Amino acid sequence: MTPTLAAAISAASITLAERLAAIGTAPPAAAAKARTAYHRAVDGAKAGLLPIPGTYAYAEPQPGQPRAVIYLSDARAGKPTRATITITLAPNARTNILAEVPCPSTPDEVLSIWHAAIDKTSAMLTAAHTHNLAALDALRVTT
Amino acid sequence: MTPALAASILAALAAARAEIKRLGKCPDITSCYEDPTPRMQYESAVHDAICSRLASITPPLGATITDATAHFTTGRIPTIAATFRLSADYLSITIKATDTTEAVCAAWDRLIMERITTKEEGHRALLAHLNSLLTTPKATP
């Protein structure tokens, strides 16, 4: 991830957090009309933020190009809606890097989350690889 | 692949080969006007000879016989082979009736070592690619 992309994701996360804060907390479920209006406002908060520059816009990802998706929590009454920007990148058909960036996040935080996601993916792949090699080695006649 | 398994496969192939020799050489089909029945019957008998012998082998857990083949040449005793697959790694080895136990085991080990090398290279390339996705790639060992 480039610092430019991290900055763009951070900017989107901050904007979204500000918009959600301005919308306020969720009304009780009993207040059906207010609840519907709240949901509409929360959904509207995402408007114009996607695609984040440097990420892929469509559902079908391009190989090697990250995709950013905004997830909104279903807020309980009296609580604000939380948002997460999920960055996915598939370096190949079997590998998927998944980084969940809470809103708001600074560019440094975005980079840190991204690095942790890559480290986690590398560790998982290495563990699977070691296991596979051990299984293969056990099949040899002379070990 | 254990030496015992290799030996039992070879023994089954040798038994099949002995039966095929009793069947005689592969009959000729020179033209489409000729009756193809003897050749078809011969090929069928050869396949039966191989399959019935291989069916008597109990492969170890995870191993399967994937193919039993015969190569037919008019006027010759067919060459026969059995393909085995071991483990879920889709490694397979074709054993000919003329192979030795040592050759089969050596070929099997070679196949595994080649697969390990390929996997090592692929894994290193993937990790290097993941590393390149960091803002500041780590020094590769």
Image: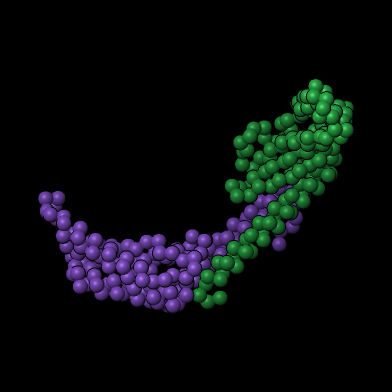
**Quick check: A9 left or right of A89?**
right
**Which residue occupies 57% across, 60% down?**
B119
Q: How many marks?
A: 0
Q: Is residue B73 visible?
A: no
A8 over B120 or under it: above or below = above
Q: Which quadrant of the figure has residue B35? A: bottom left
B138 over A70 or under it: above or below = below
**Which residue occupies 64% across, 64% down?**
A130
The chain drawn in purple is B
Residue situated in front as seen by the camera: B2 or B25: B2
Residue situated in front as seen by the camera: A28 or B135: A28
**Quick check: B78 left or right of A64?**
left
Residue B48 rendering spot, x and y as whole percentages: 27, 64
Residue A4 rendering spot, x and y as whole percentages: 78, 38
B99 over A23 or under it: above or below = below
Residue A35 rendering spot, x and y as whole percentages: 81, 26
The chain drawn in green is A
**Quick check: B92 left or right of A22?**
left
B38 over A12 or under it: above or below = below
**Which residue occupies 44% across, 70% down?**
B59
Residue B8 rendering spot, x and y as whole percentages: 39, 75
Q: Which quadrant of the figure has residue B84? A: bottom left
Q: Quadrant of the C terminus of chain A?
A: bottom right
Q: Is residue B88 visible?
A: yes
**Which residue occupies 16% across, 56% down?**
B37
**Quick check: B106 left or right of B138?**
left
Snapshot colouring? by chain
Q: Quadrant of the N terminus of chain A?
A: top right
Determine the residue located farthest toward the front in the rendered image. A30
